[in-house]
Amino acid sequence: MSRPRGLSARVKLTLSYVALVLVAGGLILTVVWLFLLRYVPDEPLFSDTGFAPSQRDLVRAFLPAAGAAMLALLGLGAVGGWFLAGRMLSPLQALTAATRRADSGDLSTRVRMTGRNDEFRELADAFDGMLHRIESQVDEQRRFAANASHELRTPLAIARTLLDVARSDPDRDVTALLDRLVAVNDRGVDLVEALLLLGRVDRGGFPREPVDLSLLAEEAVETLVPLAEARGADLVVHGDAVSTVGSPSLLGQVVLNLLQNAVIHGNAAEPVTVTTHRDLDSAVLIVENGGERMDAAVVATLAEPFQRGTTRIRRSDQERNGLGLAIVTAIAEAHGGSLTLAPRAAGGLRATVRLPAI
C-alpha cells in the first residue's frame, strides 16, 4: 500500500524532546516572573545602603541571559534527543530488517536481541517465536503438499496403466478392468475428501456444540462392525459418559479413524477396545489394539501424513489414504485437545485423545 512519506519516528522523538525542553524553560521563566520579579518595584529605590535596581533593570539584565540559556538548552535538547532517539529506536530497526528478510522469503531469520528484558526484548522474542511457528508450518505444508501430490498422482497413473494394458489386450476381462478402475477411483476420491477435511479443520470453520464421546464411540463401533467381522476382530466399547464442546461430525471422524486404524493394523486375535472417561478437566478417549511390539521412535511418526513408521505407506485395497491419524491430530488440536500415541508393553498401539471436558 503506497502512502505519502512522513516524518520519521526519530525526527518526531527529537522534536518532542525539544518541545519538552522549551516547555520546561518557559515554565521556569514563568515561575521566576510570578514569584520574584513581579514583586520588585517599577522605579529604582535609593536608601542609605545604596541603589536598589527596579523591575525594569532586572528584566533588562535577566532576559538576554535567559534567552541565551534557552537557546543552549534547545540546541542540547535537539542534539541529545537525536542521538537518544536513535539509540532507543535501534531495536525497531533490527526488527524492521528481520521483517524485510522474512518478507523476502527467508523465514529462518531471527532477531535474537540481546540485553536485559524490556518491552523491545519481549517484542523481539515474540517476533522470533512467531517466525519459528510460521517456518514450521510452512515446512509442514510443503512436505504435506509434496506427499499429497504424489498420492494423488498414484491412482491416476494406475488408471492410465490399466487402460493402456486393456487397449493392448482386446481379450482382457472388461468386468475385472471396470472393478479395478472403480477401486482406484474410490481411493482417489477418499484421498481428496480427506485433504478437504484437513483444510476445513485448519480453517476452524465449523459449528460447536456439546458432544458425548461415549455415544460417538458406540456409533463408530456400529459403523465398523462389517469391517471387523471381515477381519475376524472383536470391537469392545466401555466407559463413562463424558462430554466436550465441538463438531459432532469431526469428533465422530476422530473415533472412526482411530477404530479403523486399529482394526486394519491390529492383531485380529486381540479385541480392539474403546474407552471413554473424565480425567480432571479432560474428556479422554482411548483406543487400543494388539499387534507386534513397536518402537517408540516409530510410533512418533505414525501421525505424519502418508507415513507408516519411518517409511512410505504401502496400502492394500482395504486400507485408506494414509491420512487417518493426521486428520485425528488436526481435529483434536482444532478442538483444543491432543492425540498421544504410545506402544503397548504387550504389543500393539494405544491412541489417547484428550479434549476439554464440560
Image (cartoon, helix red, strand yellow):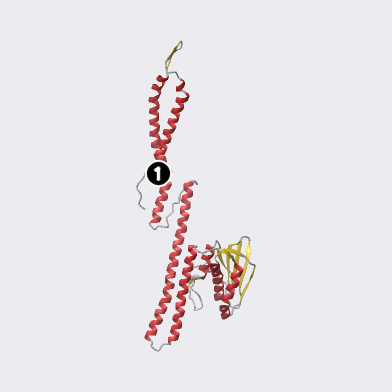
Q: Nearer the viewer, residue 311 or 77?
A: 77
Locate residue 268, reporting x and y percent.
59, 78
Residue that appears at 48% across and 67% down: 198
Occupied quadrant, residue 252: bottom right
Locate residue 248, reporting x and y percent.
55, 67
Locate residue 214, reporting x and y percent.
61, 69
Label 1 amino acid? Ala
Q: Quadrant of the C terminus?
A: bottom right
Residue that appears at 45% across and 78% down: 184
Kind of element beneath mark 1: helix
The residue pinned by badge 1 equals 9
Q: Is residue 309 above or below residue 94?
A: below
Mark 1 closeness class: few <14, some 14–19, many ≥20 residues within 10 Å: few
Asked whether residue 287 appears in the rendered view, the answer is no
Asked whether residue 199 appears in the rendered view, the answer is yes
Residue that appears at 40% across and 50% down: 96
Occupied quadrant, residue 46: top left
